[in-house]
Amino acid sequence: MRKINLAIVGATGMVGRKMLEILEEYEIPIDRLYLYASNRSAGQVIDFRGSPLIVHTLDDFSFDVDIDYALFSAGATIAERYAPLAVKKGVTVIDNSSAFRMDETVPLIVPEVNKHHLKNHRGIIANPNCSTIQAVCALAPLNNAYGLTHLNYVTYQAVSGSGVAGLADLKHGQSLAAPRTYPKPIHNNILPQIDRFTEDGYTKEELKMIDETRKILNDNALAVTATCVRVPVENGHSVHISAELKTNPSLDEIATTLTCAPNIRLITPPDIPTPLDVEGHDHVLVGRLRSDKTRKNGVHLFTVADNIRKGAASNAVQILKLLMEASQ
């Protein structure tokens, strides 16, 4: 692949720094790398491939230089303002926020599931919610083989999903300090609320999973519900999925389908998948596979993935790599 000029917006954040790490790990060929962040982070120096790079303040002129691609991980407000500016300058943007995910003109991509939709992009590609990514990696092969009619998610999401502020609440809560990020203490506790509540009693995080699953699987009629829970784990999201299939395959057939799916590792009893097992990896673990005795053609599965890597940074870099390969 030819070398590219790349920008990272939100380079000093947890996901931005992980993007830099994965760019090195994936050996993405880069000529010039531009690092942008807020004014309070400007001036920081970050090492990349043995060279120090200065972080600059993101502004209206940041994309006046020659940039091919930009990885955004700075929140929806920043993305809504600056991503269109970048596109006008000829930059292809891969955005990790929720800003464009449900825009009908923006592809929402998980490479293992729907990379074919990349060809329709108009300058912006959306990275899905972290929990959605790992869930659809497991569900897409089942949907392709057997069809899906109903999904019920229950998530157990690590505090790193809230960035350094979430990690700080967990750490400081050990000394009984009042939480600054969460509505109640997270240390030695669980919180059945992620993001704000909507009028119907769901949280925005739950609605993200519902809407994004339908879009990625290309099925607006799919019945999906979700309950999202924050747990006192530093890193690694877990999602329990109850799925109803259109047909009635055996568990052995389902296991074989999952085993053959890209980036899936099937965990069988007596072993169980846990967040500690995925730290620093990009694969999605799937375990606790069993029949749902209360629902026709029902099956339970439990997924675990590193939410900062596969749930954010790695997925974005994998999209970048696909775009680069397509442009050769």
Image (tube, rainbow, N blue to C red):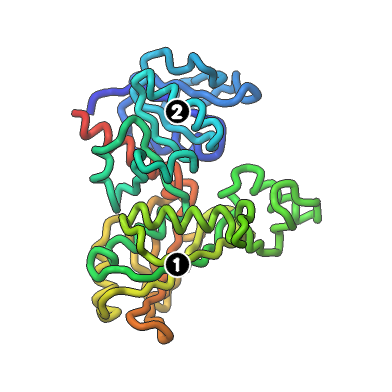
Q: Is residue 222 shown left or right of residue 154?
A: left
Q: Residue drawn 49% across and 62% down?
A: 238
| Mark 2 surroundings: few (<14), some (14-19) or many (≥20) residues within 10 A | many
Q: Position of residue 120 (x, y in %)?
A: 26, 38
> In the picture shown, does residue 80 fall above or below 194?
above
Residue at 48%, 51% (x, y): give it: 307
Residue that protrudes farthest toward the left in the picture: 328
Q: State the residue in front, 256 or 207.
A: 207
Viewer can see residue 164: yes
* Viewer-nearest of discs 1 and 2: 2
Q: Secondary structure at mark 2?
A: helix
Amino acid of disc 2: Ala
Q: Which of the 4 quarters of the picture holds residue 65?
A: top left
Give the quarter of the image for residue 223. bottom left
Q: Position of residue 64 (x, y in %)?
A: 42, 13
Which residue is rendered at x = 55% and y = 58% of the image? Answer: 157
**Number of marks present in the image shown:** 2
Q: Quadrant of the C terminus?
A: top left
Q: Is residue 278 visible?
A: no
Say the numbered circle drawn on residue 290. none
Looking at the picture, does residue 258 appear above or below residue 248? above
Q: Mark 2 or mark 1, which is nearer the start of the sequence? A: 2
**In the rendered image, which residue does mark 1 sit on?**
273
Instruction: Give the camera-side residue of 243 and 21.
Output: 243
Answer yes or no: do the residues labelled 1 and 2 have beta carbons within 8 Å? no
Q: Quadrant of the N terminus?
A: top left
Report which residue position mark 2 lands on: 83
Mark 1 residue type: Pro
In this rendering, the answer to whether 324 lies above or below 34 is: below
